[in-house]
Amino acid sequence: MGSDSETEKSQKERKKLLALAPIAKPLAGKKLCKRTLKLVRRASESKCVKRGVKEVVKSIRRGNKGLCVIAGNISPIDVITHVPILCEEADIPYVYVPSKEDLATAGATKRPTCCVLVLTKPTKGELGQEEQEKLKADYEQVVSDVSELTSSLF
């Protein structure tokens, strides 16, 4: 019984990787993906997240800084091809995760989400000191891992 569930999991992982777009680089590995989705979950709880292409592009153009997390299995790919370029122009780190469904779950929505911008502070109101420090620590760790991954690519 245990082996059946393991083979099902590996088949699901294989399907996710087959659905990836060819431009999905830098793609987060398993560990970084898990850490990134955890950061998105924590940020969405404290209202430090912009969801969807329209909101993310608007925030980047307004000068907000953060970490851009993009789903790699978007079809058609033309929907998100401009987002990495905007991120590079604004010096915002970005990373691809394999599944838009997982990204939506982490962002506390039921609707699959193309991309998410994790902000360092909430757009409205203030966070508690302890919450702010936890979010900042997670954010710094993920950003350093993403920049390390990006530097190994280019």
Image: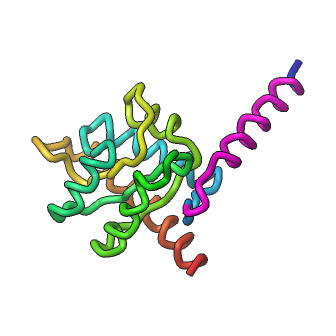
Above or below, comparing residue 118 to residue 82 in the picture: above
Please provide percent x and percent y for residue 133. Answer: 30, 52
Farthest residue to the top: give it. Answer: 1
Above or below, comparing residue 108 to residue 152 in the picture: above
- Please, what is the dominant secondary structure of the magenta stretch? helix
- Quarter holding the C terminus is bottom right
Say whether residue 11 is magenta.
yes
Farthest residue to the bottom: give it. Answer: 154
Q: How is the image coloured?
A: rainbow
- Closest to the observer, 65 or 96: 96
Residue at figure coordinates x 21%, y 55% from the top left: 59
- Closest to the observer, 119 or 8: 8
Residue at figure coordinates x 36%, y 61% from the top left: 83
- Quarter holding the N terminus is top right
Instruction: Magenta stretch: give its range.
Output: 3-23
Please provide percent x and percent y for residue 84. Answer: 40, 65
- Closest to the observer, 42 or 11: 11
**16 horizontally vs 64: left or right:** right
Residue at figure coordinates x 30%, y 75% from the top left: 89
Residue 141 visible at all: no
Please provide percent x and percent y for residue 82. Answer: 37, 63
Residue 95 visible at all: yes
Above or below, comparing residue 100 to residue 94 in the picture: above
Place residue 29 in its image quadrant. bottom right
